[in-house]
Amino acid sequence: MTFKINKLIATILSLVISASVLASCSSGQTAETSTATTPAPSAENAAATEPIAAADADPIAAAEADPEIQVEYEGNGIDDAIAANHGDPITIKGVVDLVPHSELVEFVKPKLAEKGYIIEIVGTAADETTNEKTSAGDLDFNFFQHFPYLSEYNEINGANLVNAGDIHVEPISAYSDKYATTAEIPENATVAIPNNATNEYRALRILEIAGFIKLNESTATSLKASLNDVDEYLRPIAITELDANQIIPLKDDFDFFIVNVNKAIEAKIASTVLFREGSDSPYANIIAVKAEDASNPAVSALVRALQSNETRRFIIDKYNGAVIPAKLDLQAAQQAASIPEPQPIKWKIDIQASTGSTCGLPVHIAKSKGFFEAEGIDVTLVSGNFETQKAGLASGNYYVANGDFQFFPSVQQGLEIRIIGGLHVGCIKTLVPPESEIQGWADLKGKNIGIDEMGGTPHAVASMALAQFGIDPLKDVTWVVYPADQAVEASRKGEIDAFASWDPYATLAERDSGFRVISDLATDPLFAGKTCCFLYASQKQIDQNPELIQAIARAYRNANDWIRSNYEEAARTAIEEKFVATDDYALVLELAKNYEFVYATSKAKEEIKYFAENLRGITGFLDADTDPQKFADDLYYDAFSY
């Protein structure tokens, strides 16, 4: 079965324009510059989340129904994510942007070819004619744009191109050459933003989430905004609108600037990232095809390969957060990963794992589903607390432990442990009672904040956020310790004004008691897309048993991949085997999807540096003179390099 191209490529693509600008331009885009100077700020703050773009078509079902296609994807890698073609090779041609699009396609091409799908890249510079050529059949697919841009193109041109799959996000980001954190940005700071309709909205939106402005509510549905849509300036800044291509050349004229990440990559700037979009951005880059081509098995295979866990790991490791995998409903996009075969036992170890929260899924799934046994490891899960965990890692009695930046002060004080991977993103929220006048971090000065323990992760998270808003977490707030399951009642009694807590308690307070979330690690610009729980390993065991440490890391990584391909079964297993402290299936499923469970390696090292930068000094967690880069270099260990 051969898929035939309707027409030959008509012309060589000659107009080279950055795809991020193309994908966000409007019919009225100009190179004009305008500036708005803000009035004095109020105490109000915004805390909303971005909607998640949904795919328009599911080409997978059609591929599975084809009698010539044998469906045999049952694993975590590209080989297992796609259906093998046992007929004639199927060739599709497309135009993809250069970075990272062509790099991603080149990454999957060899394995697609082995499966009987030939992907030809006929151009790496999308222009205004790319969608036109795809509509005409001169191209079988393109890969350079996000769905809002495609929708606008269809509406204006009467076309019927569809989204075959979300692949990655090139998060629009705020950079600075003058300041290391958002908290350092002074009053009346100057910021440059893109002036085209889509990217201006994205820039203004992250300024809103970061607490600088408040946008008109209508922008949340239109996904368009200009300075005229700014209802209020919460922090005094001067915003200048520039053509996207002018921002980096003129960046020295501003205190900070906002651009698409591919602009920053192409320019090779070394500026500090202050905040950026997360993986749930509606501006995920997509594979676009004609509606009738969405069922082409080669298109389906390309999408599945690009959405595979193997490719997502490649994105995370290669781009260190500059490009991030799109947030997916992998139940619809991937078949369940296979359960591995047990191997002869080589090692017997204990792992402390009694958290009762969804955070602990990787270790429980690794044991329950046989990922430890597949590495020849017999694991006994034991209970304990933070102090027994530290002591076990220090002595080598515990080989690894799930932890977060709560360990950082102990590391600085000499605890000999290393981080060998990141396990998942956001699991902590900060909430206020439904009737509270508190709208955001800026309103918490002088307030009582509840936490489960001094020095714990909710305490660290809240301290970092307060510092970003110029509030001294050591002097300007009062910390009150309450067990996580008592925080709601303490708030109702007026004993605390807000509380920072782990899930599931935080989400239960939000859902069942109407508490309002003023910060969520999954969406707050300070934390979005960043690992909050890491896999730590004993330095003693790294020195003595590096092969075992690598096997443990591999088991965790494979367990994470399995979770991401089997969210529903993972949630059921967690409840049935009592891994979590709730029997609420819908809640556990929601949290598991929010955490994503991508095992991060080099990205984890970058995030160690990021959190070290934000935990030093004012928060009291790390010494003021801590060198974040050295701290990260010393703490991270690449277990897979052994």
Image (tube, rainbow, N blue to C red):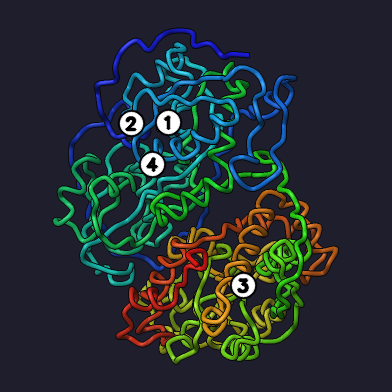
Mark 1 or mark 2, which has the lower sequence index?
A: 2
Of marks 1 and 4, the one in the foreground: 4
Which residue position is annotated with label 2?
Answer: 22
Please name the residue that numbered disc 3 is placed on.
548
Going from the N terminus, do you reach mark 1 or mark 3 first? 1
The amino acid at mark 2 is Leu
Q: Is residue 389 above or below residue 59?
A: below
Residue 537 x %, y %: 56, 77
For this view, does 331 lie left or right of residue 46?
A: right
Q: Earlier in the sequence, mark 2 or mark 3?
A: 2
Mark in front: 2 vs 3: 3
Three-letter amino acid code at disc 4? Pro
- Residue ID at (34%, 76%): 628
Indicate which disc residue 149 carries: 1
Residues marked 2 and 3 touching at CB (< 8 Å): no
Residue holding disc 4: 100
Q: Amino acid at mark 3?
A: Leu
**Amino acid, disc 1:** Tyr
* Label 4 vs label 2, nearer the camera: 4
Cβ atoms at labels 1 and 4 below 8 Å apart: no
Q: Quadrant of the N terminus?
A: top right
Spatial CA distance of label 4 from label 2 is 15 Å
Residue at 59 percent of width and 22 percent of height:
294
Q: Is residue 163 above or below residue 503?
A: above
Badge nearest the viewer, 1 or 3: 3
Q: CA distance from mark 1 to mark 3?
A: 48 Å
Q: Quadrant of residue 321?
A: bottom left
Give the percent coordinates (x, y) of residue 494. 63, 82
